[in-house]
Image (tube, rainbow, N blue to C red):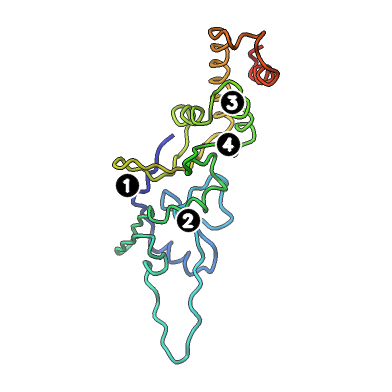
Amino acid sequence: MKKFNLFNEIITVDKTELLQAINSAKEYGINIRGAIKYAPFDEKEILIYQGKYTPQPANALVKAQAPTLAEIFGRNYQIIENKNKVLIKAFSNWQELIRVNTPRASYDDTTGDGVDKFADEALEEIGWNATEFDINYRTLVDVLEKECEGTLLCIEQEDPYKFSGLGFLDDDTHAKEVLFSYCQNEIKKLMREDPLYTTEKLTDDEKEAAEYFKCL
């Protein structure tokens, strides 16, 4: 998986398309590639902005002045305009982007407790069974981020270290195959090498998990 660190990334948007979206009176979003998308959004869409512009009611006594893009986006966005493009930095709006993107994320790594479930039911079943052999979600996420295609939308800095992220897998079916194979190999090794995990000593829950991973 590749990281998209909002601390470092500047998103470039076509100015004409952005103005069209703002004036459309429709809910729209800007994804990490700078493309304008309209609701309803694709199930794997990753957005750095989501909103719907509603102009202020006209006042007959005061001539309305069109707001700037910076005013429309709000103080949590840094906006630079040139003739044809708009450059956007979105890291200050991270908490809102968590809310916007979590419904489409494969997993949530934004809390101090770390990842505790997968959005996909098949991946979650693997995660649940793996815990019987002390294979935790952090370990599984590390495997996914190393072996699978996808995007980790995050804010990450080195000093002091700070990380918060949402994972988006490109292919849940492939991710399931990767995790299942990893867990199967780890459990077989554990049962082979650790005297506490011989077949005779497995609890009922451990046996059920071992059968799930085809280790018995």
Q: Element at badge 4? A: loop
Between 62 and 35, the residue placed more toward the observer is 62
Label located before the other in sequence (1 or 4): 1
Sequence-wise first label, 1 or 3: 1
Q: Nearer the viewer, mark 1 or mark 4?
A: 4
In percent of the image, x 47 and y 67: which residue is there? 22
Which three-letter amino acid code belongs to the residue tagged 4? Lys
> Residue 157 appears in which quarter of the rendering?
top left
Say which element carries label 1.
loop
Mark 1 belongs to which amino acid? Asn
Cα–Cα gap, marks 1 and 3: 35 Å
Q: Which amino acid, by three-letter code, is at mark 2?
A: Glu
Q: Which residue is mark 3?
A: 131
In the image, which disc is placed on residue 8? 1
Residue type for callout 3: Thr
Q: Left or right? Give the position of 116 relative to 203.
A: left
* Residue 35: x %, y % from top left: 44, 53
Q: Nearer the viewer, residue 75 or 171?
A: 75
Looking at the image, is 109 positioned above or below residue 189? below
- List the residue tagged with mark 4: 117
Picture layout, residue 129 above or below residue 37: above
Residue 204 x %, y %: 70, 18
Q: Which residue is mark 2?
A: 96
Residue at x 51% of width, y 81% of height: 57
Q: CA distance from mark 2 to mark 1?
A: 18 Å
**Residue 15 position within the rendered picture, expressed as x and y whole percent measured from the top left:** 38, 62
Q: Mark 2 and mark 4 in contact? Answer it, CB < 8 Å.
A: no
Q: Check the image and report above or below for 186 versus 176.
A: above
